[in-house]
Image: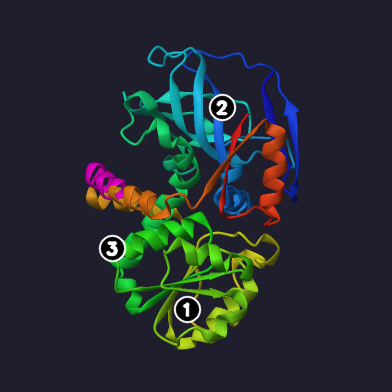
Amino acid sequence: MPIQVHVARDDLTKLQPVEQDAPALADGEVLLAVESFSVTANNVTYVVVGDMVGYWNFFPAPAGKGIVPMWGHARVAESRHPDIAEGERVYGYLPMASHLVVQPGKVSASGFVDAADHRQPMSPIYNQYSRLAADPEHDPARENERMIFGPLFKTGFLIEYFMRGEDWFGAEQVVLTSASSKTAMGLASVARAKSPAIRRIGLTSSGNVDFVKNSGLYDEVVAYDDVGSLADKPTVTVDFAGNAVLLRRLHEHFGDALKYSCLVGVTHIDDRGEGMGAGPNLPGPTPTLFFAPDHAVALFKELGPEEAGRHMATSWKTFLADIGNAIEMKVHDGLDAAASIFAKMVGGEVDPATGVIIKP
């Protein structure tokens, strides 16, 4: 019996697995059986900004409920599409659920898109599924790393590409909040390789300082309480935390030295403030939300898919070497575990040194 995990959209800590009727496939449709997915702070961001960006719309749920989007692997359990074989495996955007019905379009040897009507208004980046048998990025030995780091790393890659294209807005240093987050680590890795002149400063909670220092990705690591110690130099901030109080402190500390304020994620949900910003009369530049899919489209348009893919693959290999075994993989069975762990992730209770994989 298929199962979906429904989350209360007004309280993201309340999740409940719900049995569904077995789907009856129409011609051209495919039933994916979800094999595995990761649970990261990125998934929390998806639902926090779900109404703003449309993340709730990918996998419809009853009124007042939502289904959290995940990245993971699935197997074709049933196919009524002539070009998709039962038993083949794919990687892509999946619901926190046991199954997903897709309507493959633009089918090629390497992948397809879900052409279902309700998914078309959203960014095409999220509608693409890679067929693992012909996927150059697929490494059977690193499937866990791809689920956990892949989407997050790509966001970090795109932030560095954007900043470098703007000459880092004249800054000498970049301050990354929630420096233990996987997206921040991805950005730090790419910046170290491609923008070595920019000093990388990681801000994190006092309990995570040692972990962030040991990653070796930052030139300096500072606890949130010590923001006042940061050097007053031309700076850009990349805010992965979404903590409105912290963001205001950074703006007030740097003042005119702050050249650009980039908002990316919201790992500190309770403190994010209205609209993810820091309220009115904020000193310095207006915080600007970084929407990775738009930048991905721009990258592929500028470099072409093949060249863009080559750049990203090179940086991905460097990142995997950078992180080594810094993240311990923990695999959990069942959607009950997924619901419980996601609720803890919302509350900031999951160790950043742990990579969480769910096998429904």
Neighbour tally class for label 3: few under 14, some 14-19, many 20 plus, Cα within 10 Å: some
Residue type, numbered disc 2 = Val
Q: How is the image coloured?
A: rainbow
- Mark 1: secondary structure: loop
What distance separates the C-alpha of mark 3 from that of mark 2?
Answer: 36 Å
Please tell me whether residue 230 is drawn above or below residue 105 in the rendered image: below
Q: Position of residue 287 (x, y in %)?
A: 51, 71
Q: From this viewpoint, is residue 306 visible?
A: yes
Mark 1 or mark 3, which is nearer the start of the sequence? 3
Q: Is residue 307 magenta?
A: yes
Mark 2 or mark 1, which is nearer the start of the sequence? 2
Residue type, numbered disc 3 = Lys
Q: Which residue is mark 1?
A: 285
Residue drawn at (62%, 49%) of the image: 47
Q: Which residue is mark 2?
A: 34
The residue range painted magenta reads: 304-313
